[in-house]
Amino acid sequence: MNDKAPSAWLSTPPDPVDVEATLVALQLACNDDALPEATRELLQRAADALRTSSLDAESAHRRYHALFDAVPDPVSIIDWDGTVLDLNKAGMAAYKRSREEIVGRPIHVLNPDLPRDHLNPVWESLDRGDTYVIEVTNMRSDGSRFPVEVHSAGFAHEGRKCIVAVARDLSGRRTAELRYRELIESIDKGIVVQDAQGHVVHANVAAMRMLGVGEGQQLSDALRPDRWLVLDEFGRELPPDRLPHQLALNTGKITGSTVLGLYHRDRRELSWLSVTSVPQFPAGGDHPEQVLSLFSDVTELKRDSNLFDRAQALAHIGGWDWDAGRERLYLTDEAQRILGRVPALETLEDMLACLNEPHRSRLRHAVELTMAGGRHLDLELQGTHPDGRVFWVRVIGEVEGGESLKSRLTGTLQDITERKRAEESLRVQARTDPLTGLLNRDAALSEMVSRLDDPERAALAVLYIDLDRFKVVNDVLGHAAGDRLLCSAARRIQRAVGAEASIARFGGDEFLVICDTSDDATRPERLADAILETFGDSFRMDGEEFSITASIGIAQAPFDGVRSQQLIQSADVAMYDSKRRGRNGWQAFTPELAEQQLQRLQLETHLRRAVHNDEFHLVYQPQVDLGSGALVAVEALIRWRNQSLGEMRPDRFIDHAESTGDIVGIGGWVLQEACLQMQRWRQEGLDIPRVAVNVSYRQFLGEDLASCVAAALADAGLPGSALELEFTERVLIEDAPDTLRTFAALRALGVTLTIDDFGEGYSALNYLRRLPIHGLKLSQLFVQGVPDNQSDVAVCQAVTGIARSLGLSLIAEGVETEEQRRFLLQLEVPVGQGFLFAAGLKPDDLASYCARVGVLRAEQQAFPFHREGGSTSTPAA
């Protein structure tokens, strides 16, 4: 590193004393005869070179300072570490400091606000060969600040990396910019600045006023192109590329005064402007970076011209003028066209005659009030053309003039027929179910509120209709077929109801029928019977035939509710009671049903808290070898003991928990508790091979079931083979990748997978062979009828055959008699459970049971149909 003081790096020439002494020494040596001639000549050349170099250095030093100080802006030379090496006169003047106060000190003396690492981005740019430009605020010796724009460049001096920084004082430019902005805002001409993409960058106060931009309104929103219709001076719509600002951007030339018509679609106002657009170029650029448009409002000059009439025609706006003193009406051509009358209308009564009642009376009354009190009128009115076509017109008017008899009423007529048609279409769409074409939920509620608020129409009944087994069809055939089924069901309801009631699709597979009971008290029950009758015929979808029935609940006002939600809730309660009674029927609401509904709400409230309050416990029903009676496994069955409700069996609360979603939390608790109990039995020396746990379909869909099972097994320290999961048939019809992945993950844990109550639901055999399951459980609905009921015998034989052909194990549920046991053994069903062997037992009682009958260890169990590899089409997990 050069160890010179910073101030001596270039600003000081070589020391003349040192140079002169060296020259004297060299000259003496040259005159020393004792030295060889060649040596003396060499020393002479060195002396000449040193003398020349000293003169050159002094001349270069003078030139450097002459140039350095001639620069009008402050210039500083800065070392690589930020130390100021030199400063020109302009800098000393700008900072009001001497060179000695700055040179040799860090750059922070000029700008104390700089961060410590401020040179990092500077050197990064300079090392790339770029210059570095930044705007900062520097400080004078008196503490005052002033803005500067600093341009920095790098160079090397005697192997040292240095920076030359030129600071341009921006104070004058800032003042000029401020005055420019003040001028822009105070001028009475509108000014809009747009960037190269046409986006508005700035608009002055006059422009905001002329364009109708309100206080607080976003400029970009107010000037959106879709809000405006732009016309040329002949009233023709201008394409975007012909607008003055766009022409100026595209050509780079000034677009002279151009007359434009601006029609605001929302406010329905037309104004005319004279616009001049000036392109603005960046420094050194050849394409405009923005455009400034200057405009004046020339609407007044255009009001009575033919051009204005043309613009009104394009915007479907006409003008009208009624001279009250002379009782004369003047209409522009467009206004005449809107009203559709020939010859021209001449009086106000002629115009009123074009309107329908009560709109005619409304306009007459509004005109009278306006003329009497100087009010402003703004009405939307309906009329009829001579050919019978209905039209809608918006009439706006205000008084001009002084005395009443001489006053004039002027305004506009706008054809709003298309808008009214669109509004009506939207209104119909808003009230219509898009799938079935019936009323939708909102429309049904609105109609009920309207009728209940009218004492003369308040006597009504609501039929709440729910399609039975619709979800099964929807799941099996898909949503498209389900939609077609809903449409077919809607048509059947329409045929049954006819014109006696309003029909709405209330949501999903639920429909509402709203009927009047004032003239026929039996109408609700009669319509319900007609609806059930029309559902008597099967539905055919995609080559399949389905028997879809309906469950109907009936509620009547005012007996079952005086508000719409009350009536619907009452009808809903009655509908669910109809389902409970066996479906395919109707049920009228009664106070007893209301009490049952209250009990269900209480049940839901207590059920939500049951897990937290430790109110559940498990009992375990043995699964036994039908031949020996030895225990093979146990099934965990949940019981609920509540302080208020008492002992609750699963059939009292499981379905409710399924519908509310509480079953997910309850099922998780059952899984954890069953695994922990297995651990306790094993610690006590009771080696029960496996515990079966029922898994809700909601658990299967609503959580990461495989992770939950793995966690429960890990917490209890159990292998996967100690757990069996029983699913309902519904999982068979979910042939989704997630379903297959979940089953594969469970099999990978070693868990046994079984389909519970097989045969009760829609047994999708195609899906059964594709899922990696281990076994089936034969439903007790079929077991209870054997061996006497031939239908049940046939079903049991069929299920056994399916299990045998697919290599699945089979367990029979609900075995209660010795005859049933023998029949199942004849079918080679190896395992069963039921009251013949034991009901659900408490953990301690199960230990006693096992001591009595024995436990068949896993390696001793033989399942003739069990397939170790899972499905024939799915590899074992």
Image (cartoon, rainbow, N blue to C red):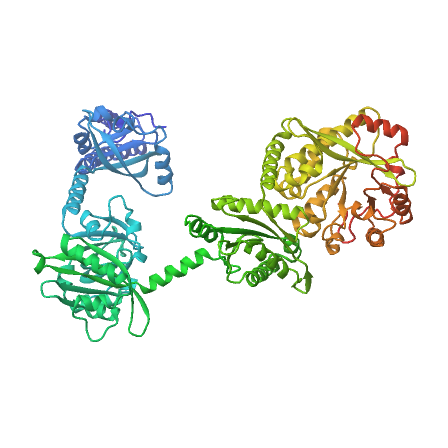
Q: Where is residue 297 in the image (x, y as percent from the top left)?
A: 16, 57
Taking depth in this image into account, of 63 and 379 the one nearest to the observer is: 379
For residue 613, above or below residue 72: above
Residue at image location 14% in from the left, 54% down from the top: 372
Task: Check the picture and name the quadrant holding the N terminus.
Answer: top left
Residue 787 in the image: above or below residue 688: below
Report x, y in % for residue 572. Answer: 57, 46
In the foreground, 690 or 35: 690
Residue 395 x %, y %: 23, 60
Residue 186 higher or lower than 713, as above or below: below
Left or right of residue 522, residue 227 in this image: left
Q: Where is residue 505 in the image (x, y as percent from the top left)?
A: 53, 55
Q: Residue at x 61, y 37 (%)?
A: 600
Is residue 268 rendered to the left or right of residue 129?
A: left
- Name which quarter of the figure residue 598 lies in: top right
Which residue is nearer to you in this view: 812 or 292? 812
Residue under the image location 64 percent in, 30 percent down: 610
Tell me if residue 251 can be seen.
no
